[in-house]
Image (cartoon, rainbow, N blue to C red):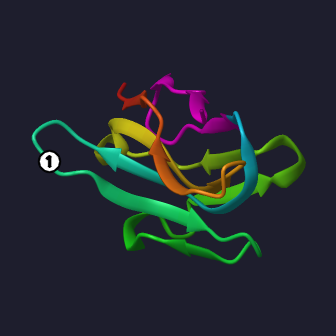
């Protein structure tokens, strides 16, 4: 069984920074894309950033230049460095991973989410 555990959320003032982490554990042979999504109250879950196995990245327009996604393949971990945070970044942030398990099954799994609140 593969699990994701997110950490790093919290309360931060506008203009501040946070770093989210997501660790994948379990019977993993290979991790493909790793991504962060977010969902604000009353809104749908949207893609924030994605990083491929070759470390190519893509960002949602509103976070370009402020957020950076990265990964450490040795640790099965994906990070989201968030700088210059704004009130509109307030949301629950979810980690999403596409992986191949030891049973050679392609899976797509979600973390439970970590809350980021940007407020003065």
Residue position for label 1:
43
Provide the major secondary structure of the magenta segment. Answer: strand
Taking 37 as reference, is 87 above or below it? above
Residue lying farthest to the left in this orientation: 42
For image coordinates 59% across by 28% down, the residue present is: 5
What count of labels does the image hold? 1
> Residue 15: x and y, percent?
50, 42
Quarter of the image holding residue 51?
bottom right
Quarter of the image where the N terminus is located: top right
In this rendering, would 118 be left or right of 56?
Answer: left
Quarter of the image holding residue 17?
top right
For image coordinates 42% across by 31% down, the residue present is: 113
| Magenta stretch, residue numbers | 1-24
In this rendering, would 21 be left or right of 88?
Answer: right
> Residue 95: x and y, percent?
50, 44
For image coordinates 67% across by 38% down, the residue present is: 24
Residue lying farthest to the front in this orientation: 103
Residue 96: say if magenta.
no
Mark 1, Cα crowd under 10 Å, few <14 / some 14-19 / many 20+, is few
> Residue 6: x and y, percent?
57, 30
């Amino acid at each position: 069984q593969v699990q994701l555990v997110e950490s790093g959320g919290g309360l931060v003032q506008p203009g501040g920074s946070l770093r989210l982490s997501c660790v994948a554990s379990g019977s993993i042979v290979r991790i493909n894309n790793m991504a962060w999504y977010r969902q604000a109250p009353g809104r749908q879950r949207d893609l924030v950033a994605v990083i491929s196995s070759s470390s190519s990245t893509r960002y949602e327009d509103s976070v370009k230049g402020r957020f950076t996604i990265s990964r450490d393949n040795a640790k099965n971990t994906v990070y989201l460095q968030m700088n210059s945070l704004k009130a509109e970044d307030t949301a629950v942030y979810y980690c999403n991973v596409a992986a191949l398990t030891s049973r050679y099954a392609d899976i797509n799994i979600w973390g439970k989410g970590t809350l980021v609140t940007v407020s003065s």
